[in-house]
Image (cartoon, rainbow, N blue to C red):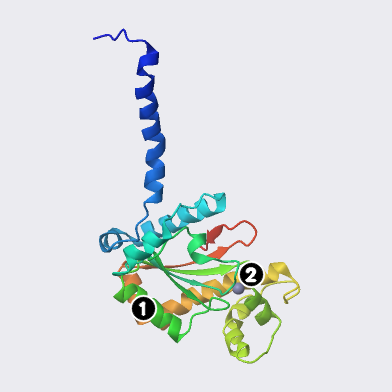
Amino acid sequence: MKSNRPITSRLPIILALVAVFVAMPLLLISENPPTTSEEQAALSPDAVLADLLAGNARYVEGKLTERDIPKEVKASAGGQFPKAVILSCLDSRVPVELVFDQGIGDVFVGRVAGNIENEDQLGSMEFATKAAGAKLVLVLGHEACGAVKGACDGVEMGNLTALLSKIKPAIEQTKGFEGERNSKNDAFVAKVIEENVRQTVADIRSRSEVLAELETQGAIKIVGAIYSLKDGSVTLLK
Ligand SMILES: [Zn+2]
């Protein structure tokens, strides 16, 4: 039946509908409960990777998810079911959870200068995946890494000497690089940073039977990526 009511009398209803549609996404955005056991179980390694990259795109655009942190803290107190384990450098300009727009209980993060793996990091990754169900191992290097620069220059200092020696194999991998081979050459440093991530990924596979087996079974993926200090973007290494 055709209504003869003037549009003005229907205005409150229209406005109410508009308000609902405008508010709905905001309501959804403010509800970000930590990853649940069911969500974690349903995720594939590729889905987790896509989720992290989508989060990074929001970070780059300055459109981070609005979060009720105290609520997330309370919601995650009873248990954790993170999607991924991320091995990052110590660098203060790489805030890992923010970089991927993740909340409380969403990702494990291991950090060490130069994002190298060692027995303790491998043990942590094995716990994160085999015991706690994470689906992705992501090694995250970054531009202009101070640890890599130190290794390129042969810096020796206290316990740092032993740590930087673990980056040396990545320097070896750049034997064909032509040009100045020290921290003053940005192109050389960038090449070593990339090789260092590749080396860490290869070492994880060769030094952890647990992780290699999980990857072979398709239960997890192990990938490497580089973070740009200039624009915050994360680029996967193929
Ligand atoms: Zn670094």
x, y percentage for residue 152?
Answer: 68, 79
- Alpha-carbon distance for marks 1 and 2? 29 Å
Q: Which mark is residue 191?
A: 2
Q: Nearer the viewer, mark 1 or mark 2?
A: 1
Q: Which residue is mark 1?
A: 126
Which quadrant contains ligand 1? Answer: bottom right
Question: SS class of the residue under badge 2?
Answer: helix
Q: Residue extending furthest left?
A: 1
| Vertical order, 151 against 33 (above or below) | below
In this picture, residue 87 sits left or right of residue 168: left
Question: Which quadrant would residue 95 be assigned to in this image?
Answer: bottom right
Is residue 215 positioned above or below 123 on the image? above
Would you call the spot at circle 1 few (<14 residues within 10 Å), some (14-19), or many (20 or more)?
many
Q: Which is nearer the eye, 94 or 210?
A: 94
Which badge, 1 or 2, is on the more N-terminal residue? 1
Q: Is residue 138 visible?
A: yes
Observer-nearest of 81 and 199? 81
Residue 167 falls in which quadrant of the image? Answer: bottom right
* Percent x, y of residue 10: 35, 18
| SS at circle 1 | helix
Horizontally, residue 236 falls left or right of residue 175, namely left
Q: Residue at x 36, y 62 (%)?
A: 45
Establish if 21 lies above or below 132. Answer: above
Give coordinates of residue 196: x percent, y percent: 57, 75
Residue 83 in sight: no
The amino acid type of the residue labelled 2 equals Lys
Q: Amino acid at mark 1?
A: Glu
At label 2, counting other C-alpha atoms closer than 10 Å, the crowd grade (few under 14, some 14-19, many 20 or more) is some
- Measuring from the top left, give residue 163's x and y in whole percent: 58, 86
At horizontal 48% and vertical 59% (from top left) the residue drawn is 100
